Image (cartoon, helix red, strand yellow):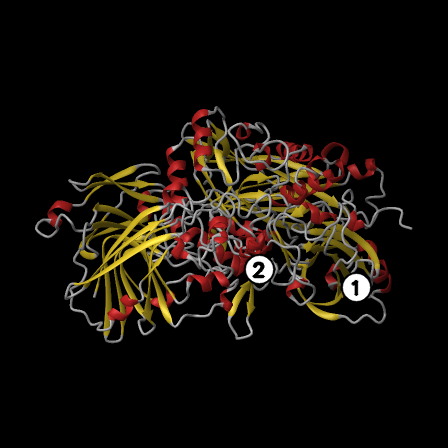
Amino acid sequence: MNTIRNIWENPEIQSVNRLPMRSSLVPYESSSKAEKEVALGPIACPSSSSSFYKSLDGEWDFAFFDSPLKTPGAKTKWNKIKVPLSWTMQGYSIPHYTNVQMPFDCVPPAVPEENPTGYYRLITKVPAAWKNRRIVLHIGSAESVVILYINGKEAGISKDTRLPCEFELNEFLTQNQSSGKDEFEIIIKVVRWSDASYVEDQDQWWFGGIHRSVFLYSTEKVFIADAKTLTKVEWKDRSRTGIIPLEVTLGYSEFMGSIIKSKQSDTDIKKFKIAYKICKLEGTPFRGTVGKTIEKGTLDCSLDVRNTLCNASKEIRIKNPKLWSNETPELYLITVSLHDEKRHIESTSFTCGFKSVEIKNRKLLLNKKKVYIHGVNRHEHNEYTAKTLTTEEMVQEIILLKNFNFNAVRTCHYPDDERWYELCDRFGIWILDEANIENHGYYDVMSRSEQWLNAYMQRTQRMVRRDKNHACIFGWSLGNESGNGPNLIATGNWIRGYDNTRLVHYEGFVRPEIHQGDFTLESLGFGKQQTDFIGPMYPTIELIKEYAKTREDYRPIIMCEYSHAMGNANGSLADYWKAIESTPGLQGGFIWDWVDQGIAATSKDGKKYWKYGGDFGDRPCDYDFCLNGILFPDKTPKPVMYECKRLFAPVRIEPVDLKKGIFTIENRFDFSKLNLISFEWNLSLNGRLAASGKQKLEPIEADEKQLVAIPLASLFKGIAKKNDDIQLNAIFRWNKDTSFAKKGDIVSIDQIEIQKGKGFADFADFESSCEDYTTVLDSIKANIVHAYTENECVKNKVSTINDIPTPWDFANKPTKEWINNDLMNHQEKFVKASIIKKDCGKFTDIEINLELSKKISEYPRAGITLEIPREYDEIIWYGRGPHENYSDRNFSAIKGFHREEIESMGVPYIVPQENGLRTETNYIELNAEGKTLHIQSDEEFSFSILPYTVQELFRCNHTSELKESKKWILSIDAAHRGVGTGACGPDTRDQYKIKPGKYRLHLRVW
């Protein structure tokens, strides 16, 4: 009988023999090699060439069992497996997706007896140069428990799926050393479910196995254990001083030689020196170089544990250093070398940057400047390799972030791969680094239980100790959706004692104290001295505005999650930012989230699609709730990205006096001058170019404005009519190459309406080349439905819609009315439609009047559909575009003429749903070979043209299941419901809803 619980069911034991966490340092044989390689960075130097480093990535032996109680034997068949890469992506067990609920039904800390367990085996050699040296195994991360065996002996244990663990191996290599044998066996046992699973219950896939790199490194008996530089900036008048409190910690091997067995008095007299050198990092994020030496010197150090904890420290002061920011990510290279009385022992190198972070008067000040957080939550995800990402893919993501004007990332809900922070240091992305803590399924339970305190504390401490030197990190997050309790207060207090240069955040401190209740005016005031900024999730605009205006608080509101991006979503993003920019005390937030967590698959008929929760037979599951990204799983942008690009742009034009043609251009950079970008403009008259020009932007400072004059009156004199539609387009481009964009790439496009068109404008003549358009007109039908979006409906849960109480997925949404009334198939019961066609010779005049019944409180749309022959393959329209846009998500869509292939007008959201709309349209032109169909309105309308019916889109759960119609389905709407964010957050705002009443369309067709 066991005397203690199984290690995978014992939260009080988080590790055995695991080495203390440290910064991501590699030992080198020389200081010059260390500084050169580290300067190069992770792109130019993807793997260390230090003679003290050996990568173990590649092919390992693998044995898979259904229980951790089972072990390999003589008859076990060992297969081959790739490391790093989760075993669920290599045919062992299945991915499993849950959001809140646990993937199994057990009482904590117990887990199922059937518990997938993998044994990784590798026979490797100790390099000859490592003889009589300390040897350490580094395991980048594994889900969720690591049990290590060296030469058949249990050598260590570690929990925490998202941080590395290291083990010293020498004690288990004594036979090798005595026999002279240089080969030894590593077996890494990984248990999928454990007590750690309860603390890692995040909204993501459960996988299994090793998903980050594995390597060996070697040191001497005494070595550089860690280096810490929590840099600060002292400000005085117009000058500043950069402070590097350099702290180097020596380590000593517990299994080598006599040091550990010596008396402390003997150990104290062993003297060492640390040589340090600080250089400016030059070059580019793609390839850094060692720059000018700023400072160098030496420190005396010893193994005097009683008086120094084996630390050597010095405060290094640098006059007027270049500051790190997202716009100017200036870095410095620090190289430290260990010497004894006779020789050099080892060197290591790392980067740091100077910045200041403070909260003052309801403002987050970065380098003394209020910076709006244009942020996003980012899960690590690849459609083929799950949590294992290449450096190239990370760079791709950062370039997307920078090109779409994001400046910040929250590492939801765990620390990321070390390379991500190095890249953000170099390219310039502010990081809110989050501990791997979420016990959503047992909200408020673990955070109040001493049994789980060690798990909380170690995860937080290890994150901070690993990532402390990264310039990009402006704050630490204690975790996510775990309730409120003394364990979280303890972790926050520990951080404040360790690092006073950054912020501490946790959203649970501003919720009602027990259970996951909604945020209130009262609760937003909670957590003073515990969370440095107020970080609610999915608050309404009204709530955050009212709190900022009516309640006293020294903290700003920065939403840790908002604008939930599930499917066709992110409605009212511009409304949020209008409130944020006009209300002191509001300072931005992090959109949820970055990338759809879909897993690539191929249907039986060869079509690519993406799987989500439940598609692997994983039960219980939360289906498509893992599809919340503003990118598709292949990292292609969704339409909302363009909304972000304009809203977050570092420049904006506003009218001052339209009659005189006076405008201001505001420098919305945080630290840079405006002349980094160029300005050009054009004027359109009913969509046709009327005039254009360029104007030089002055090198004005951030937040300043430049006046520009465009002679509108003289340009349109004698040309424009009072009913013409006139738009000013302002195009801003990069003035030079950057690390993420080329000279001439678009920063943003702004549009100012000079005059709104009225009536039937002159878009095209009436010479029709479409002789059979009457057939199209015969297909006109009233239409008041769309295929319900994921904000409106989780398809896989429709069967529960009438449960009592109403399931969360359908609560406070109109979808319950729509489905219970079978609105999609019985529209005629809820709309009175009058469609009157009049032959006017050159065109047909069509008047459509719709009256939506009060039997239902609101509707998806009010409009018509027409069937268009598939021979038409091109569309031109005058309206908002070119990308998909809706009434509550069209700030970035420019009004003008746009041309697209019809087959590209839809957006292939992973779960088929309403998509492809374009708003504020006046004119459509459909082209086939030798013929054109024209449709024009006297008032703006919305439209979409898709190869699927509404019913077909709603029927299917994946794009691969869709069956195309024989004709294009053209939908023209007098009004269409906004998309909102109702899957998790506020539903569509009232001004974008379609209420019962009368709606009208007046069209000309020829």
Q: Earlier in the sequence, mark 2 or mark 1?
A: 1
The image shows residue 665 at horizontal and vertical percentages of 28, 42
- Residue 547 picture location, percent across and down: 47, 29
Q: Tell me which amino acid carries mark 2.
A: Tyr
Quick check: 209 left or right of 468?
right
- The disc at residue 185 is 1
Q: Position of residue 269 (x, y in %)?
A: 78, 37
430 and 783: which one is in front? Answer: 783
Residue 769, image x and y in percent?
20, 72
Residue 78, picture quadrant: bottom right
Inspect the image, locate mark 1, and give the three-letter code of the amino acid beneath it: Glu
Does residue 695 appear anywhere in the picture? Answer: yes
Number of dots carrying numbers: 2
Quarter location, residue 276: top right
Q: Nearer the viewer, residue 417 or 610?
A: 610
Q: Do we see residue 368 in this rendering? A: no
User: In which quarter of the view is residue 374 placed?
Assistant: top left
Residue drawn at (33%, 38%) of the image:
701
Q: CA distance from mark 2 to mark 1?
A: 38 Å
Residue under label 2: 612
Q: Is residue 758 rendered to the left or right of residue 699?
A: left
Image quarter (top left, top right, bottom left or bottom right) of the C terminus: bottom left
Mark closer to the observer (2, 1): 2
What residue do we see at 46% from left, 26% from top? Answer: 361
Q: Nearer the viewer, residue 507 or 131?
A: 507
Q: Helix, strand or loop at disc 2? A: loop
Relative to 778, say whether 344 is above or below: above
